[in-house]
Image (cartoon, helix red, strand yellow):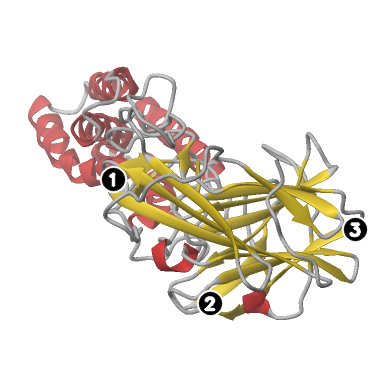
């Protein structure tokens, strides 16, 4: 019996070390009342408690105590597998069948290892181990995406007045190419991680069409009296869509020698447009609208992963324009302003990032595969910042994206062929 008890201590310690290795961020990454705190930090702390209880049972010659907590990993795997099957019913059952089978095997092996305990006592303790099931269930339920937090501006798709979904224009002495249509790079029918065998919402990841059949977008251009280029785009999302990666707007600028950006909300502070890597290496830089009504600029630690370091902050009311000025050294080149971003963005805490970082994002920098250009990518609700493949939901509706491009130095902004 002492051998079985110490084997339980060893197996639980290995489980605790494995769980500990997943905590790549500080323990306060999620608040205590968030389900992901219990699915990450809370679970690790509880598993270490199991190790301590099992060791106490082994040292004091109380095998029933060691047997009781030794069943916890099996119960957690079994409960998590069942919860996954019912929570993500459209996903391949193999994702959840494997942990369920391992959990059953764990329980059978543990039960047989303590044969010297009276059978009745083992059965009672086995039944009581159901108390550990919530720890397995929370691993799954904490990753079910919350209700959509985006707010589409329109209910009807306007007519399409432009044939191209990509706009070219000048940006000072540089060149800007911009795509203003909402596109999903991945999607999931049931909110599970978008993977190769995860079913996707019908046509969700197709480029939105500007023309029939199946038109889902509209785009028009005009030059304002002040000489700015106004891009008016709209994209239909026909049903609530869970996604990990998507883009509300993306654009690139070439021809700048020493590029940096300034946000209207953070005043005259310039943020260098630096090269970033993926999946690890040079850090990404990004801004986002927070629930407190501030626009905050952060720097990641490695690629897009935390911990995240705040670089700047300024007030930005819901519905207010989000302005970004491209600089070359000390000279402003052009300003890109999103007129509809803040009104439609989801400001809830990101399940991939935590640390107060919301799911909306304005990322900027030079991609590692082409450092000659600056790219800016915005999303109303995505989990590209952080670690993992958690999804977040876009509400059904028509998302409007009016983008104003203004030139500096007295120039007018005009579309180029």
Report the disc number at residue 135: 1
Residue 69 in the figure: left or right of residue 303: left
Residue 240 to residue 170: above or below: above
Q: Is residue 41 visible?
A: yes
What residue lies at 47% left-to-right and 40% top-to-bottom? 183
Q: CA distance from mark 1 to mark 3?
A: 51 Å
Q: Nearer the viewer, residue 150 or 51?
A: 150
Q: CA distance from mark 2 to mark 1?
A: 35 Å
Report the disc number at residue 294: 2
Secondary structure beneath dot 3 equals: loop
Q: Nearer the viewer, residue 5 or 236?
A: 236
Q: Nearer the viewer, residue 148 or 171?
A: 171
> Label 3, on which residue?
258
Q: Earlier in the sequence, mark 2 or mark 1?
A: 1
Residue 266 in the figure: left or right of residue 318: right
Q: In which quadrant is the C terminus drawn?
A: top right
């Amino acid at each position: 019996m002492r051998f079985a008890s110490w084997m339980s201590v060893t197996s639980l310690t290995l489980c605790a070390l494995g769980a500990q290795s997943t905590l790549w961020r500080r323990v306060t990454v999620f608040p205590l009342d968030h389900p992901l705190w219990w699915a990450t930090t809370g679970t690790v702390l509880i598993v270490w408690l199991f190790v301590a209880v099992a060791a106490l049972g082994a040292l004091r010659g109380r095998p029933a105590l060691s047997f009781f907590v030794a069943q916890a990993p099996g119960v957690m795997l079994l409960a998590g597998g069942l919860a996954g099957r019912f929570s993500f019913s459209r996903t391949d059952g193999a994702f959840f069948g494997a942990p369920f089978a391992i959990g059953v095997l764990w329980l059978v092996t543990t039960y047989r290892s303590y044969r010297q305990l009276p059978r009745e006592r083992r059965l009672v303790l086995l039944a009581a181990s159901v108390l550990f099931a919530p720890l397995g269930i929370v691993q799954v339920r904490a990753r079910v995406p919350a209700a959509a937090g985006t707010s589409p501006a329109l209910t009807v798709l306007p007519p399409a007045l432009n044939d191209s979904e990509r706009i070219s224009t000048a940006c000072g002495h540089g060149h800007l190419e911009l795509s203003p249509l909402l596109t999903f790079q991945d999607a999931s029918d049931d909110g599970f991680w978008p993977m190769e065998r995860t079913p996707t919402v019908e046509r969700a990841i197709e480029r939105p069409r500007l023309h029939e059949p199946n038109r889902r977008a509209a785009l028009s251009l005009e030059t304002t009296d002040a000489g700015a280029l106004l891009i008016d785009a709209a994209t239909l999302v026909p049903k609530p869509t869970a996604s990990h990666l998507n883009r509300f707007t993306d654009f690139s600028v070439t021809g700048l020698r020493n590029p940096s950006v300034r946000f209207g909300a953070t005043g005259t502070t310039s943020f260098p447009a630096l090269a970033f890597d993926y999946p690890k290496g040079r850090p990404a830089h990004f801004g986002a609208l927070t629930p407190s009504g501030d626009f905050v600029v952060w720097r990641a630690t490695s690629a897009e992963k935390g911990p995240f370091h705040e670089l700047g902050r300024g007030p930005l009311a819901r519905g207010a324009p989000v302005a970004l000025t491209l600089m070359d050294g000390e000279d402003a080149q052009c300003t890109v302003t999103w007129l509809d971003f803040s009104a439609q963005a989801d400001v809830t805490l990101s399940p991939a990032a935590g640390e107060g970082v919301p799911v909306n994002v304005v990322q900027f920098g030079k991609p590692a595969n082409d450092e000659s250009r600056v790219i800016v990518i915005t999303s109303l609700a995505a989990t590209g910042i952080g670690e993992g493949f958690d999804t977040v939901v876009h509400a059904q509706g028509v998302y409007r994206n009016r983008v104003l491009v203004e030139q500096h130095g007295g120039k007018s902004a005009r579309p180029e062929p």
